[in-house]
Amino acid sequence: MFQLSNILMRIFQSLTFLAVILLVSTGLFAQGLEISPVRLDFSLEPGANQAQTVTVRNTTNKPAIYTLSASDWSLDEKGNLIRQEKGSNPNSCSDWVSFTPALVELEANGSADVTVTLNVPAGQSETKWSIAYVTLQKEQEAPQADKDLAMGIEVSQSIGVFVTQSPRSNDNASAKLTEFKEDGTDEEGNRRFSVVTKNTGEKILDCNMYMVISNLQTAEETKLDPVTFRILPEGIRKGELALPKGLAKGSYLVAAILDYGPNYPMEGAQIQVEVK
């Protein structure tokens, strides 16, 4: 593995950092429910608190009831979201999250703002995360014999608002490419390369992974579109990059480039390959 040379740094210095689409979207939609934003980032010091606002919209033509609750989440090595019970993740801040109000009743096509407050206990300087679920409660009519009783409530659908907390004073952000190797071909005959990234710091990282292909005979370089992903502290992300078809015969230097922010050095790994 190597840190990028000055030449490669100049190649990429003009690139705009791309955020992870899934976790930084400004709004999210489900049938009859719209939430904005779907990511709340806090940078509080221990002992501090802060309130942010989430807008809940009922996009149906009838009244609806929504409840808000906090739980936990994580990511697997492929970047898939893992839903977890509240308090089960040692990096959880779900107990620090509160909602005002925690139950919202909206008329047809109505909207309301909910205040999401994070209270960081004294002495808690680590990066933490949780998820706030906005859940549509669907009224379900009681059996005929129970008409005099209250209507039952059935959980129908929910949208998650990602909550992250990392003190501004904690600037320990770092990542490494721990593996980069050719890994056969896919069903379409594309040569595949597996790459493993490890978050070696204490910050949640939004990453871009690029492939740069350099023709060793002509010095011509091809830069492919980035793969974007998020990686949690101590997390590992396994992914794949593909060599494009149509390359002329010859020797190439294939580099995987990891960019996790303009304030941090890029990381890279390279392999020499032959195209026949």
Image: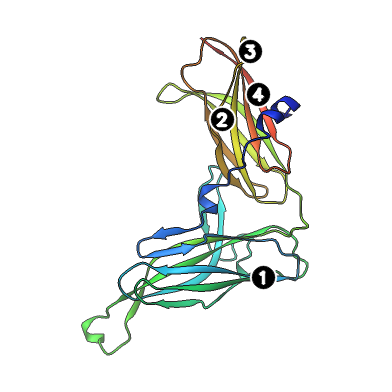
Distance from Cα at disc 4 to Cα at disc 2: 12 Å
Q: Position of residue 29 (x, y in %)?
A: 41, 59
Q: Which residue is mark 2?
A: 194
Q: Quadrant of residue 164?
A: bottom right
Q: As shown in the figure, which amino acid type bears the numbered disc 3?
A: Leu
Nearer to us of marks 3 and 4 is 3
Distance from Cα at disc 3 to Cα at disc 2: 22 Å
Q: Residues within 10 Å of mark 2 (few under 14, many from 20)?
A: some
Secondary element under disc 1, as helix, strand or loop, is strand
Q: As shown in the figure, which amino acid type bears the numbered disc 1?
A: Gln
Q: Which residue is mark 3?
A: 216
Distance from Cα at disc 1 to Cα at disc 4: 44 Å
Camera-nearest residue between 63 and 184: 63
Q: Residues within 10 Å of mark 3 (few under 14, many from 20)?
A: few
Q: Position of residue 209 (x, y in %)?
A: 60, 35
Sooner in the amino-acid sequence: mark 1 or mark 4: 1
Sooner in the amino-acid sequence: mark 2 or mark 1: 1
Secondary element under disc 3, as helix, strand or loop, is loop
Residue shown at 34% from the left, 74% from the top: 108
Q: Which residue is mark 1?
A: 50
Q: Residues within 10 Å of mark 4 (few under 14, many from 20)?
A: some
Q: Is residue 228 left or right of residue 50?
A: left
Q: As shown in the figure, which amino acid type bears the numbered disc 4?
A: Gln
Please determine whether, in this image, residue 195 is positioned above or below residue 54.
above
Nearer to us of marks 2 and 1 is 1
Please determine whether, in this image, residue 228 is positioned above or below residue 135.
above
Residue shown at 70% from the left, 42% from the top: 262
